[in-house]
Image (tube, grey):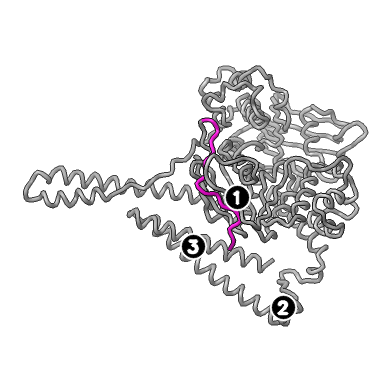
């Protein structure tokens, strides 16, 4: 195992904020690490430090002399009129056949390689940049919010790429589903400290909650024992006959120490104003055609979305999701047919770029006060502002000095303070951290109005959506399954396409494991197949054994009252979790 990158005793400060305060972490040559943290914690600054674009105030950054760091660029590195093939060859210096081979992995048809990159959507341009990354043969990939604005198909392709990538990866993301699918370790940046955990983001968050709950229980037991000892000492230290016992109890009291409890950062809680519950249709589309003059995006659209529904609009980028939302909200007239909203519908709209039209001279608080329902208490406004990271002096900031992300959060906060009974939301989770996205999902689930929305965050879509409308190939229709079923179908399409175009898998029976070529190993196919079955069987037994051990240690940990024993059991649990994850990953590889 080779250490590619290591940060030691690092300090970085902006004004009064300590982004890094003696922090450190290590990335080895096969680690898949997800970096999480609240907005403003310093994740982007850390990325710039790793890339050499910013310096530490103090500390050391070690880079292995064989490190080849690949960074997914957010800007567009393409020349005017440059085709996909021309860019890949220029950027990588590789021959056309190699560029075409890598581009195929991201589903580029041969004919598309000659098209100008500028003709492709943002999601397809990201695929071009990913292909360029792979051509440089990096041994550590640094991906900063890679799923922003990517459609589901491109996200799944990126996941597939990362799972097949046998080298190190560091992913900065707020997308829990993506992190869970691609990363086996989690690195948290909070209060200037970096903490590495050997598990995916869901396991990490669950473990954090368990550890805190266990520490509170242990501390309650210790507090009761301390009180008992103190009472005994007070009663007996003055008596000659019991003074010696009192001294012994005093020594026991000194040895009783409370466990440190990790205080969670301020909890995000978003509450939407109550709305009147309605029944019947919220909106109907009758023989609608959507698009622009001279360009029909989709036609024969017939939808009926009931009051109280939460409808997710899905489809690949460029298929017309935003066009449909604009048509529903009358910011784009239909080319044909009619859109009918129900009586009394009060529509609130969050569009991806609406924040560019905010009044520059207002403060954040003045904007929220203007948007809030009449008679909303100032504390309620401040609470919502705080949920979107406008706390303390930040609520008095002028809009003119806010970043694009801050403006987007401000618009969303203002929308949630208003009294709309219909919300139309285009990518509401962008610019929000993991905790705020989860809080927004909870608020929308409790909301009794109607919601029509798009999002690239699968965890958010899974939590919120009660219905799915698909925009695909010029058609718009209710999808027959739920959102999880839609994700499964898209993933299956990608897997089927990969099998059809991979010579090694043509003719392989479904469920049959493809072993290495006998010519490559010097062994017969029968021998390889026996070895494969033997390793799979051994792994299954190992996984079962580790799972039982993990359950046993967890049970002991829940009952432990001694601080030292609790720490020992916790360390043992972490080691078992890491070993179990590695065994399960190897088992999955063998099933591939």
| Badge 1 or badge 2: first in the primary sequence | 1
590 sits left or right of 232 in the view: right
The kind of secondary structure the magenta stretch mainly shows is strand
| Badge 1 or badge 3: first in the primary sequence | 1
Residue highlighted by disc 2: 521
Residue in front for this viewpoint, 282 or 99? 99
Figure disc tally: 3
Range of magenta residues: 1-15
How far across and down, in percent of the image, does residue 219 sit? 34, 46
Whether 9 is among the magenta residues is yes
As helix, strand or loop, the secondary structure at mark 3 comes to helix
Between marks 1 and 3, how big is the CA–CA gap? 20 Å
Q: Are marks 1 and 2 in contact (CB under 8 Å)?
A: no
Between marks 1 and 2, how big is the CA–CA gap? 35 Å
How far across and down, in percent of the image, does residue 221 sit? 31, 48
Which residue is the extreme one toward the left? 240
In this rendering, the answer to whether 66 lies above or below 254 is below
How far across and down, in percent of the image, does residue 503 sit? 82, 68
Whether 153 is among the magenta residues is no
In this rendering, the answer to whether 536 lies above or below 389 is below
For the point 89% across and 42% down, which residue is it?
81
In this rendering, the answer to whether 371 lies above or below 109 is above
The dot on residue 34 is: 1
Between marks 3 and 2, how big is the CA–CA gap? 33 Å
Q: Is residue 356 visible?
A: yes
For the point 87% across and 40% down, which residue is it?
80
Which quadrant of the view contains residue 496? bottom right
Label 2: how many Cα within 10 Å (few below 14, some 14–19, many 20+): few
For the point 44% across and 41% down, which residue is it?
263
Question: Which image quarter is the C terminus in?
Answer: bottom right
Residue highlighted by disc 3: 576
Q: Are marks 3 and 2 in contact (CB under 8 Å)?
A: no
């Amino acid at each position: 195992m080779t250490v590619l990158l290591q940060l030691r005793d690092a300090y970085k400060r902006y004004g009064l904020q300590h982004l890094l305060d003696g922090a450190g972490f290590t990335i080895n040559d096969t680690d898949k690490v997800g970096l999480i943290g609240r907005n403003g914690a310093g994740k982007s600054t850390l990325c710039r430090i790793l890339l050499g674009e910013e310096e530490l105030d103090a500390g050391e950054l070690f880079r292995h002399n064989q490190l080849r760091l690949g960074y997914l660029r957010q800007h567009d590195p393409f020349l005017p009129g440059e085709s996909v093939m021309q860019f890949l060859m220029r950027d990588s210096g590789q021959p056309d056949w190699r560029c075409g081979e890598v581009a195929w992995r991201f589903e580029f048809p041969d004919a598309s390689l000659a098209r100008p990159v500028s003709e492709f959507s943002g999601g397809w341009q990201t695929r071009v940049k990913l292909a360029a990354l792979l051509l440089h043969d990096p041994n550590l990939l640094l991906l900063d919010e890679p799923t922003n604005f990517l459609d589901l198909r491109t996200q799944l392709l990126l996941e597939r790429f990362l799972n097949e990538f046998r080298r190190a990866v560091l992913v900065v993301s707020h997308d829990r589903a993506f992190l869970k699918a691609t990363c086996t370790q989690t690195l948290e940046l909070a209060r200037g400290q970096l903490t590495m955990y050997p598990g995916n983001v869901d396991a990490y968050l669950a473990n954090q909650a368990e550890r805190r709950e266990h520490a509170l229980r242990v501390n309650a037991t210790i507090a009761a024992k301390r009180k008992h000892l103190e009472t005994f000492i007070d009663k007996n230290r003055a008596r000659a006959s019991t003074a010696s016992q009192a001294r012994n109890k005093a020594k026991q009291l000194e040895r009783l120490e409370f466990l440190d409890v990790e205080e969670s950062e301020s909890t995000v809680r978003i509450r939407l104003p109550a709305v009147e519950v309605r029944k019947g249709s919220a909106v109907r589309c009758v023989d609608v055609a959507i698009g622009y003059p001279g360009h029909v995006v989709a036609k024969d659209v017939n939808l009926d979305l009931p009051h109280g529904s939460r409808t997710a609009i899905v489809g690949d980028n460029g298929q017309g999701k935003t066009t449909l939302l604009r048509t529903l909200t009358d910011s784009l007239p239909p080319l044909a047919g009619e859109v009918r909203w129900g009586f009394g519908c009060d529509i609130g709209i969050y569009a991806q770029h609406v924040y560019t039209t905010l009044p520059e001279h207002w403060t954040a608080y003045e904007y929220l006060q203007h948007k809030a329902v009449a008679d909303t208490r100032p504390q309620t406004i401040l609470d919502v502002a705080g949920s979107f990271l406008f706390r303390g002096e930040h609520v008095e900031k002028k809009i003119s000095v806010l970043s694009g992300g801050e403006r987007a959060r401000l618009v969303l906060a203002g929308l949630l303070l208003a009294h709309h009974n219909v919300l139309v939301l285009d990518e509401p989770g962008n610019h929000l951290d993991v905790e705020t996205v989860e809080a927004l999902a909870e608020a929308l689930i409790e909301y009794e109005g109607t919601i029509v929305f798009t999002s690239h965050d699968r965890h958010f879509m899974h939590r919120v959506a009660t219905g799915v409308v698909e925009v695909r190939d010029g058609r718009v229709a209710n999808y027959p399954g739920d959102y999880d079923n839609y994700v499964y179908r898209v993933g299956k399409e990608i897997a089927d396409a990969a099998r059809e175009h991979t010579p090694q898998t043509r003719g392989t029976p479904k469920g049959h494991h493809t072993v290495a070529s006998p010519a490559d190993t010097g062994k017969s196919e029968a021998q390889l197949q026996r070895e494969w079955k033997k390793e799979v069987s051994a792994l299954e037994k190992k996984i079962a054994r580790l799972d039982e051990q993990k359950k046993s240690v967890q049970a002991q940990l829940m009952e432990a009252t001694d601080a030292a024993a609790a720490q020992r059991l916790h360390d043992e649990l972490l080691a078992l979790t890491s070993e179990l994850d590695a065994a399960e990953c190897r088992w999955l590889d063998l099933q591939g």
